[in-house]
Image (cartoon, grey):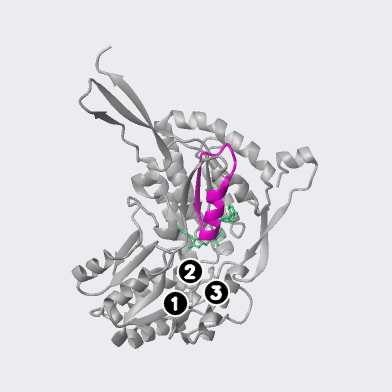
Amino acid sequence: MPTSEPDRVLGRRAARLAVVDPATGETFDEAPDQQPDELDAVVDRAHRAWHGWRADPVARTTALRAAADAVETAGDDLARLLTREQGKPLAESYAEIARTAARLRYFADLAPRTRRITDGRPMHSEIRWRPLGPVAAIVPWNFPLQLAAAKFAPALAAGNTMVLKPSPFTPLATRLLGSVLATALPKDVLTVVTGREPLGARLASHPGIRHVTFTGSVPTGRAVAEAAAASLARVTLELGGNDAAVLLDDVEVDRIADRLFWAAFRNCGQVCMAVKRVYAPARLHAEVVEALAQRAKTVAVGPGLNAETRLGPVNNAPQLASVEQVTKQALADGARAAAGGHRLDGPGYFFAPTILTDVPPSSPVVAEEQFGPVLPVLPYRRLDEAVAAANGTGFGLGGSVWGTDLDQAEAVADRLECGTAWINHHAELSLAQPFAGVKNSGVGVAGGLWGLYGNLRPFVVHRPQEA
Ligand code: NAD
């Protein structure tokens, strides 16, 4: 790997970041551990590239479509590397890459609308939309490519350039994606930087950055907002969730059990909008626990590269420790594990898929975000209680309602305090929809036209009707 510019100047040896395969717990490769002082040159290049990139929307559309093609062409290499460093089953990595390409294509063809406003005076105002400048994107390790694409596709389509920082736990697939995209995009339009903190904090506060778009945990989101306040850059925060699934009295447990299980356990439960708590009517509670526990006990857990694996390891050692800690706390609080409840023996960061019952609502596995393969199932007697409990945390990302009478389910869904409510499924998103959390789950709106406008500023020209 070539030595970077500041390293040459300062005569120091480039630092490296060890990357661990979560299926083995062993280091298998490394990435550059870039230092904050390298960001000045990176942001400066992003700024210079912006002038050309913003100028020609037709060329942008062509380049973004070519970028989508390039991602698909590199799909096999990207998928294997993503599974190796993230842990998810290979089929899920392929799905993530498909969504990355789809996002590029969707935003390549989306354009803001110039609007004219007249208000009776002999003049009109025309609203034109302008890009912001270099955008910083900071993303977590659960969907490194897809979440990065959710940021770079609208930002670049809007005419901005971007500096993208993946999590230090998953730098490799993003670096490969960066070089794949570089075959289709002009130089320095998208730059990937990798390294430990304070690289992200420095990027968020960099004076050359005009928009900081962040996905990650609530505490880090607060730190990012504070850092960006230094330069008063625009901030978009997509933060944690603690989504509830409310099962109604007429739900057919057999019919929904598979969907509900995977809404909680896909990507080993490491999904911001996974089902993280289930509220079941008391008379159906035992049946729901049994249906989920039976699936948890029999699902194929293993390395993501094994063809039969449906559930991989937790991504990293601190997250495994956190999942283990909230589970132990729940058991100490009086919960019972109907399935799992412990780490799996052997190498790697594997945790047995866990269904918890008899959990006090104040236990952190209910009140906080567990972000792992552990699901509490709580009984309720009155529907109002379930809705109040679903709305009773500081989070407000998503929620779902499950039942046979769709009108009733929709009426209950309408009462959920969150950004997206689903009926009889969970976490399905359309590229065209807005995506926004309420309460601690986020600031700003991503997705669809809203995501595009989030990367633009209005520029208004007033013009008289006559000279
Ligand atoms: P995290 O907040 O620890 O890290 C996210 C990113 O921020 C990483 O790249 C990290 O290196 C960087 N970072 C850490 N400290 C920073 C600082 N002081 N300044 C700037 N950047 C910093 O989150 P994580 O553990 O990687 O991811 C899990 C969290 O992400 C969960 O809470 C999950 O719900 C959330 N998430 C939310 C969404 C959403 O769309 N709302 C999607 C996926 C994940």
Tell me if 53 is positioned left or right of 195 in this view.
Answer: left
Residue on which the image places disc 2: 369
Relative height, residue 27 to residue 38 (above, below): below
Quarter of the image where ligand 1 sits: bottom right
Query: For the residue carrying disc 3, how many other residues have a C-alpha within 10 Å: few (<14), some (14-19), or many (20+)?
Result: many
The verdict on residue 29 being magenta is no
Position of residue 273 relative to residue 61, above or below, is below
Question: 124 or 402, which is in the foreground?
Answer: 124
**Disc 1 residue type?**
Leu
Q: At numbered mark 1, what does the secondary structure look like: helix, strand or loop?
A: strand
Instruction: Find the magenta span and give its range.
Output: 205-227
Image x and y of residue 206, in percent: 60, 41
Image coords of residue 188 (percent x, y): 56, 37
Check disc 1: other Cα within 10 Å, few if <14, some if 14-19, many if 20+. many
The extreme top residue here reads 467
User: Taking 328 as reference, is 29 left or right?
Assistant: right
Residue holding disc 3: 323
Residue type beneath disc 3: Val
Residue 375's label in the rendered image is 1
View extreme (right): residue = 11
Up-down: is 243 above or below 295?
A: above
